[in-house]
Image: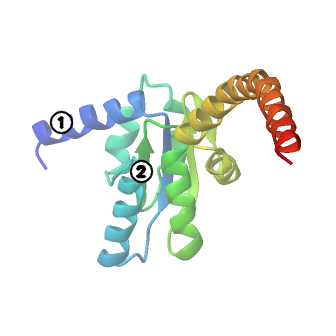
Amino acid sequence: MDRAQKEAVVAELNQIFSDSGVVVVSHYAGLSVAEMTAFRTAVREAGGAVRVAKNRLAKIALEGTPAAGMGDLLTGMTVLAYSEDPVAAAKAVQDFAKDNDKLEVIGGAMGDQVLDPAGVKAVAAMPSREELIASVVACLGAPASNIAGAIGAPASNIASILSTLEEREAA
């Protein structure tokens, strides 16, 4: 890799560290090509991406980013999983690591907060952005439907009383 290619990689990694909601660092020693492809697919389907880069270049790219404190995690064969959604990449990595013992989560960063493996697991347990939006919309819609039901209930009661009176007169 020549100097220009290294500078391009550093610039790309710097962009990843600056813009991502979460970056998860894992060791992938022992993963086969098929398993690594499955890992990349799982993270991509969750809304994230995977990047393997030299640790030295990643440490250079970390300088001046909010995630600068996670430089100590970049040792050995590391893979970076990242996403804009602060939960998506962490959840995908944790789910994959449950089924595959060769992928070891060693930490990560969420903004300027450096995460240990337990922190990544806690972030993965949180609801995703879509789940939070759905619950907020449900909470906002529930009072309106209750009000509509309360307003419609007296009219419904009057209609049922009238139909009962009509049945009595007919009988």
Q: Nearer the viewer, residue 15 or 126?
A: 126
- x and y percentages locating residue 49 in the rendered image: 35, 49
Amino acid of disc 2: Leu
* 28 on left or right of 139: left
- x and y percentages locating residue 65 in the rendered image: 44, 25
Colour theme? rainbow
Relative to residue 30, is residue 51 depicted above or below? Answer: above
Q: Which residue is mark 1?
A: 8
Q: Can residue 24 be seen here?
A: no
Between the C-alphas of marks 2 and 1, the distance is 17 Å
Q: Nearer the viewer, residue 155 or 101?
A: 155
Q: How many marks?
A: 2
- The tag earlier along the polypeptide, 2 or 1, is 1
* Figure quadrant of residue 45: bottom left
Q: Disc 2 vs disc 1: which is toward the camera? A: 2
Query: Which residue is painted at 31% across and 42% down in the image?
Result: 57
Relative to residue 101, is residue 6 depicted above or below? Answer: above
Query: Which residue is painted at 70% across and 52% down in the image?
Result: 118
Whether the residues at callouts 2 and 1 have beta carbons within 8 Å, the answer is: no
Relative to residue 167, is residue 12 depicted above or below? Answer: above
Q: Can residue 162 be seen here?
A: yes
Q: Residues within 10 Å of mark 2 (few under 14, many from 20)?
A: many
Q: Callout 2: helix, strand or loop?
A: strand
- x and y percentages locating residue 38 in the rendered image: 36, 70
Query: Which residue is painted at 39% across and 28% down in the image?
Result: 19
Q: Callout 1: helix, strand or loop?
A: helix
Q: Which residue is mark 2?
A: 80
